[in-house]
Amino acid sequence: MPKFPHLSDYDLKSVIAYLRSDMPLVQASSNEAPESNPSFLVKFLCRVAFKKLDYPKQEISMPDTNNLVAYGRYLTVGRYDCWTFHSSDFKTLDFVSPEKTPGYCSGGNTLITPSGSSIFSANITPDEKTGIGTWIEEDFKNVMHSLIRKDGKALRAPMLAYNGLTDNEIKAIWQYLLTVPKVSNEVNRQWDSKL
């Protein structure tokens, strides 16, 4: 389950309003939920490894959408949780201070495709050889909207197209990623069905 400790109060209230709305996707269903019977390992991990986060002590405000770097950081860290997937390992994520996460945005995290194969997340730091340092904003926009990389190849699942992002949101995320420290990390982008 993703954690969103940096989500603004405004966005959190918007999620709650949606869940309480009359929208068909959030209406009660007559289907009965399956019985939950977590294993000992899951119970152990929930008690020891998956530590709860403290509730914020003050309001989390939305950043100024005209400050593209601050807004881009918010979108990357607070709203869309990009940094968790594009860092080096889920086990070392620092949810309180994301930028202190080892391999922050430098890729290599193991992701599972819909077919059950493993693939590793891309390096999205501005490193010229192993990241997105040779890209331009239009390359980034193409990836986000149509899943087409700079080299013309399609991205693979589990990455989804973010067609709902506005041009300003894409510009903000792009501007923020340009401020992330470069990390040279050549990620094996081949499928690996043996992991």
Image (cartoon, rainbow, N blue to C red):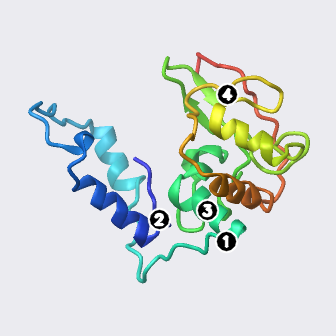
Tell me the quadrant of the picture where the C terminus can be found. top right
Separation of residues labelled 4 and 1 (CA atoms) = 30 Å
Label 4–label 3 contact, CB within 8 A? no
Above or below for 148 versus 136:
above
Place residue 108 in its image quadrant. Answer: top right
Amino acid type of the residue tagged 4 in the rendering: Leu
Separation of residues labelled 4 and 2 (CA atoms) = 27 Å
Residue 113 horizontal side relative to residue 185, left or right: left
In this rendered view, identify the residue nearer to me: 191 or 172.
172
Label 1–label 3 contact, CB within 8 A? no
Residue at (76%, 23%) from the top-left corner? 153
- Look at the numbered disc 2 and give the secondary structure of its residue: loop
Camera sees residue 18: yes
Residue 29 horizontal side relative to residue 161, left or right: left
Mark 4 — residue? 155
Query: Which dot, 4 or 3, sits closer to the camera?
Result: 4
Above or below for 65 versus 183:
below
Crowding near the residue tagged with mark 4, few <14, some 14–19, many ≥20 C-alpha atoms within 10 Å: some
Mark 2 — residue? 7
Mark linked to residue 98: 3
Separation of residues labelled 4 and 3 (CA atoms) = 25 Å
x and y percent of residue 80 in the render? 53, 52
Crowding near the residue tagged with mark 3, few <14, some 14–19, many ≥20 C-alpha atoms within 10 Å: some
In this rendered view, identify the residue nearer to me: 127 or 95.
127
Q: Earlier in the sequence, mark 4 or mark 1?
A: 1
Query: Which dot, 4 or 1, sits closer to the camera?
Result: 1
